Amino acid sequence: MPDKPIPEQDPITGKSYAIHYLIATIILIATLFWALYDEAWGQRPWKAFQDQWKTRYSAFLDKATSSSAKSEQSVEQDPQYANLQQDYQKAYQDSKAQADEARRKLDDASARLLAVQSVFTDRRAYVNALTYELETSDSSSEKASKQKEIDKYKAEQATVEFPDGSKKKFNFQQLEETYNEIRDERTKLSLELGDVLKPVTAAKAKMDGYISDHMVDLTPQQIQGLKRRATEWDPAIVQINVAEANIVDRCESCHMNTREPLKVTAAAMTEKGAKNPDEYARAFASHAEPELLQIHDPEKFGCSPCHQGNGRATTSIEKAHGNYEHWLWPLYPKENSEAGCQSCHAADMVLASGDVQFSTINAGKELFRRRGCNGCHRYEGYDKEPEDMNSVGQQIKQIETQKKENVKNSADLMKQADAAQSNDEANKLNTQAVDLRVANSRLDARVQQLDFQSHS
């Protein structure tokens, strides 16, 4: 076979590919370094949190005041605290007269509102009941009759006795207007009182915060132990694994001070010279309710069942807090953090830990109950007695309907028996009619049982 002629422009011998190899090599090396960085840091932002924690927590412990070395009385003798206390006393004295007057007006408005509300609530409930009957009526004449009844009831005079002993009569419209006016007045007075007390509240918060930030109820030896632990800490995933509940939470890989034996605030974790806490300082604060952790051990309950979020995620704050499109249960916001209690405590009317009550969720439960929301928006376990009563009522209603059908069918069977062509057919129909009557007797006994159950 003859050799092929060598082309004049041989791409191998006539052209250099050095620049291509150089570019490819640079890209490969850059990819390698990027992969190493991403493996070590890019996919592990918690390492940056732990590095910051070592620095800031060690600095905090260096300045921390042990109760055995420096008492609260010593803290209060600090010049900075004395200035805060002086500011508080001045703010209190400046606002005392105005605050007392605002409280007096607010108490008077609250008493008048309660007097009107006790009458208005009952009358409004009756009007709402009549309105419901009006809306569910089928015939025009019945609707007109209900409307007349509503108008007549609204025109009737109701007497309200005010706290000062005076009495005044109102029709429904006047009563509603008075109720709304007093309620708006009370709201306005509450806001005014809040504005008056704002300087006092702010000054008191600064005093309490100063003591909280400078008092630690640990011995010097215990503080040294914490400092040694922080100094010797090596970056690592901190994980809670509750196998029986299939819970894996790595929240404490960033929130390092959640279960520390002393209170750490975001302000105490703020870098020196910074005006406001950054994301690291906020993450390093102690748990807001440490008493809860004593009865809800994170090793048994985890974190996400109460706070939600994606407890397994560690590659970004967004994913760890569940604030992305592929996660259905994002972290509860701070102002709604008590919502997690509802997961287990839906049937509890009031939630408390020791002397501390959880005002937000308790107010929500009270509002849910007081406004009658559970009449339509029911869920299992809440307000069980009315649920049982409602169930008994429904069963009795179904039984009564069944009894009426049995009586009607029995009468039809008796007529068919009278017109039967043979004795056998007549006897068969009579037997069926008697069986229906016996069934009604059993249903009567069941109604008696349910009625007894509802009154027990």
Image: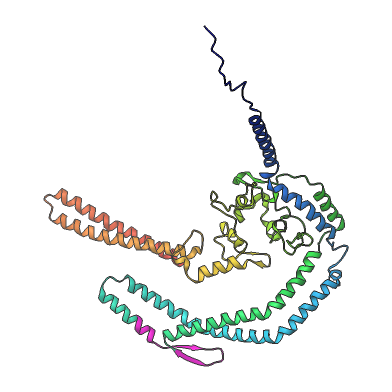
Residue 56 in picture, x, y percent from top left? 78, 55
* Image vertical order of residue 389 relative to residue 154, above or below: above
* Image vertical order of residue 5 relative to residue 67, above or below: above
- Residue at (57%, 59%) from the top-left corner? 342
Report the side of 45 relative to 448 (left or right).
right
* Image vertical order of residue 297 relative to residue 2, above or below: below
Q: Nearer the viewer, residue 356 or 66?
A: 66
Q: Residue furthest right?
A: 69
Report the side of 282 relative to 149 (left or right).
right
Residue 327 in picture, x, y percent from top left? 55, 50
Residue 236 in picture, x, y percent from top left? 73, 44
Report the side of 53 relative to 422 (left or right).
right
- Residue at (28%, 75%) from the top-left corner? 142
Residue 285 in picture, x, y percent from top left? 72, 58
Whether residue 114 is visible:
no
Report the side of 336 relative to 141 (left or right).
right
Q: Residue furthest left?
A: 421
Q: Nearer the viewer, residue 3 or 54?
A: 3
- Residue at (46%, 62%) from the top-left corner? 378
Query: Toward which corner of the image does residue 176 lie, by quadrant?
Result: bottom left
Q: Is residue 411 magenta?
A: no
